[in-house]
């Protein structure tokens, strides 16, 4: 019994360790699912922002092209020519436009030799003119593409060396490039906050859940293991009883049946000698042999009953245990 106590404690510790693994797996799966959902929402928001920038860039470009066509027919007397007239109207319109987002910006530029010259930078009602950039600068790849007549979207660094999502459009007829862009940090910020909040709340809620789970299941686990130990101890006890019973039955068979059969064999030997000498068998001898046979049969029946009581066949194990209790 003493050797079973450490084994019981070890198995109990193993069970608790397994529950810790299970809780860790559930926590990991929950966090992975939560962050996967946030990532999918981010991808959706990114696509929507990309579509919004494309729509803004295209609408501004088409509008400026329409104004340029009008000025090419009716604004020949404007100082600086029709191109200056169109640019003046476009800049004046942006002075009255607040812009979009926290970091949203419109850029208008043209090529002069191997330089990209900015004509407009509009962010939050503020109009500025950034310094010129080389045509193939890594801080203006979207402008380079738009000046080549291409349109589309891309993630790149702008003239401030900040990573942005940009939609670019060429303005045909003027050889200008128009860009609508927004900082990637502005798109990502809500999802960073949501991820951090999800992590904190998730860990907190899971911590409470683990505590309640542990408090509720710990007594059950202890009871289960205690029951298992009781069953194991009962099994060993029954094994010991079986061995003792086998030893007792073997002793009874040897002592009772062995003696009876030995005495019966002796009587048969005497009877055989008497018959060989032509003597009449003694009635008492025959009766004694009959008594020995009856006693042997009774011993066999008694031992058989002890091995398998009839009450087991009639009423079952439960009733048999109660009858012997």
Image (tube, rainbow, N blue to C red):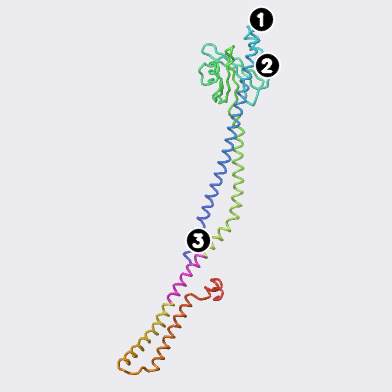
User: What is the quadrant of residue 295 in the picture?
Assistant: bottom left
The residue indicated by pointer 2 is 93
Q: CA distance from mark 1 to mark 3?
A: 101 Å
User: What is the quadrant of residue 157 in the picture?
Assistant: top right
Quarter of the image for the C terminus: give it. Answer: bottom right
Decide if residue 132 is on the left or right side of residue 127: left
Rendering coords of residue 233 (x, y %)? 50, 66
Rendering coords of residue 254 (x, y %)? 39, 80
Decide if residue 280 is on the left or right side of residue 66: left
Q: CA distance from mark 3 to mark 2?
A: 83 Å
Rendering coords of residue 263 (x, y %)? 37, 87
Report helix, strand or loop for mark 2: helix
Residue 8 marker? 3
Asked if residue 244 lies in the magenta stretch, the reply is: yes
Magenta residue span:
231-247
Asked if residue 246 lies in the magenta stretch, the reply is: yes
Report helix, strand or loop for mark 3: helix
The residue indicated by pointer 1 is 77
């Amino acid at each position: 019994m003493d050797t079973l106590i450490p084994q019981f404690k070890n198995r109990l510790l193993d069970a608790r360790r397994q529950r810790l693994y299970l809780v860790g797996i559930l926590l990991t799966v929950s966090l992975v699912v939560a962050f996967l959902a946030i990532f999918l929402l981010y991808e959706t928001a990114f696509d929507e922002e990309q579509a919004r920038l494309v729509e803004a860039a295209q609408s501004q470009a088409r509008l400026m092209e329409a104004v340029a066509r009008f000025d090419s027919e009716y604004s020949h007397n404007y100082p600086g020519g029709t191109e200056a007239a169109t640019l003046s109207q476009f800049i004046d319109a942006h002075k009255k436009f607040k812009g979009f987002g926290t970091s949203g910006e419109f850029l208008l530029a043209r090529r002069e030799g191997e330089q990209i010259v900015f004509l407009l930078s509009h962010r939050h009602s503020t109009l500025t003119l950034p310094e010129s950039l080389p045509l193939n600068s890594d801080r203006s790849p979207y402008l380079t593409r738009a000046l080549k007549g291409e349109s589309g979207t891309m993630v790149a660094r702008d003239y401030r060396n900040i990573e942005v999502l940009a939609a670019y459009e060429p303005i045909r007829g003027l050889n200008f490039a128009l860009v609508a862009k927004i900082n990637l940090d502005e798109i990502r910020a809500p999802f960073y906050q949501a991820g951090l909040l999800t992590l904190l709340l998730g860990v907190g809620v899971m911590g409470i859940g683990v505590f309640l789970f542990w408090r509720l299941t710990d007594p059950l686990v202890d009871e289960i293991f205690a029951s298992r130990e009781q069953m194991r101890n009962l099994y060993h006890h029954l094994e010991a009883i079986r061995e003792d019973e086998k030893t007792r039955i073997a002793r009874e068979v040897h002592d009772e049946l062995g003696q009876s059969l030995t005495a019966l064999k002796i009587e048969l030997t005497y009877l055989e000698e008497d018959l060989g000498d032509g003597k009449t068998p003694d009635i008492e001898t025959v009766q004694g042999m009959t008594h020995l046979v009856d006693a042997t049969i009774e011993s066999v029946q008694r031992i058989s009953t002890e091995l398998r009581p009839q009450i087991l066949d009639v009423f079952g194990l439960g009733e048999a245990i109660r009858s012997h209790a």
